Amino acid sequence: MKKNVIKSLEQEHKGKKYEFPLGAKAENIETDDERQFVSKEEKMKISEIDTMKQSFQAGVDTLYNKCKGLGFTPAGKNPGHISDTIDKIYADRYAKGVSDADSRVNTDSESYKKGFTDGKASGVGAKMCYKNEIGDSNAYLNSFTNPDTGHYSYGATFDESSRRTTIEIPGRYSIMISDIEGYAAFYRNEEQIKVIGHSFIYFECTLEEGDTVFFTGSSEKAEAYIDKIPD
């Protein structure tokens, strides 16, 4: 058998033997860019690469679906787009956390306790605005943020359910009540202190720590505020 073939078939005809080659060794076959041979080791490496690709894509799909589940859909299923989405999730969640923290009164925090103690010592107190958000006759006025006059509840706590404000820093307070279309009144510890009709009034009142105050109004125009006078 010739050395360049894999195997051959021998036949005898009229006393003469003939050899017919059935294949050729791969090492003797010329290849080009479109036709190539791979070894067993190379096949294993290709299989390992395919497995890695599948595992990588599965990881990408997991991260993509996680982002989508959080309400942030990446522009594409690739690391770059997913990375951009993670940055957006972080930025949005951080901003929301800051916003929630700014609007929350955490009376257990050390900064709140220190600020309250320092403020109480300096005589600084609440400035809170109120209005009739319900519009009902003789409604309890609700505390609200007034961008024109300022509003800060430092040193006082407003209860949403009872519509009452508990004073935490004692002293003299400047108070205003107004209802140009009806009647409004100011109460301290459930006792009516002032009442006006179709007008407004400014006055001062001494409030002690623990006092509860509230306002009522009979029209949608009813408004009021309390403002701690610095000591």
Image (cartoon, rainbow, N blue to C red):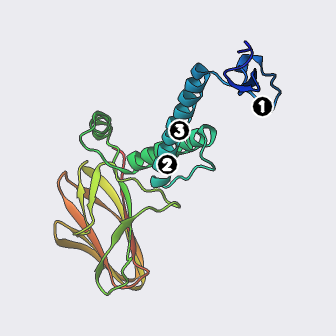
Which is more foreground, mark 2 or mark 1? 1
Residue 83 percent across, percent down from the top left = 57, 38
Quadrant of the rendering where the N terminus is positioned: top right
* First-in-chain label (3 vs 2): 3
Q: Does the CB distance between marks 1 and 3 fall below 8 Å?
A: no
Q: Nearer the viewer, residue 75 or 78?
A: 78
* First-in-chain label (2 vs 1): 1
Which is more foreground, mark 3 or mark 2? 3
Q: What's the distance in space between the residues labelled 2 and 1, CA to CA? A: 44 Å
Q: Does the CB distance between marks 3 and 2 fall below 8 Å?
A: no
* First-in-chain label (1 vs 3): 1
Find residue 114 and report its image quarter.
top left
Which kind of residue does numbered mark 3 sit on? Answer: Gln
Confirm whether residue 102 shows in the render. yes
Q: Residue at x 23, y 50 (%)?
A: 168
Residue 28 percent across, percent down from the top left = 77, 17
Find the residue positioned furthest to the front.
14
Q: Residues within 10 Å of mark 2 (few under 14, many from 20)?
A: some
Q: Residue at x 55, y 30 (%)?
A: 47
**Horizontally, is 40 left or right of 127 in the view?**
right
Q: Is residue 86 above or below residue 127?
A: above
Which is more foreground, mark 1 or mark 3? 1
Q: Is residue 2 above or below residue 82?
A: above
Q: What's the distance in space between the residues labelled 3 and 2, CA to CA? A: 20 Å
Which kind of residue does numbered mark 1 sit on? Answer: Arg
Quadrant of the rendering where the C terminus is positioned: top left
Which kind of residue does numbered mark 2 sit on? Answer: Cys
Residue on which disc 2 sits: 67
**Residue 35: image tag:** 1
**Residue 54: image tag:** 3
> Dot 1 lies on which element?
loop
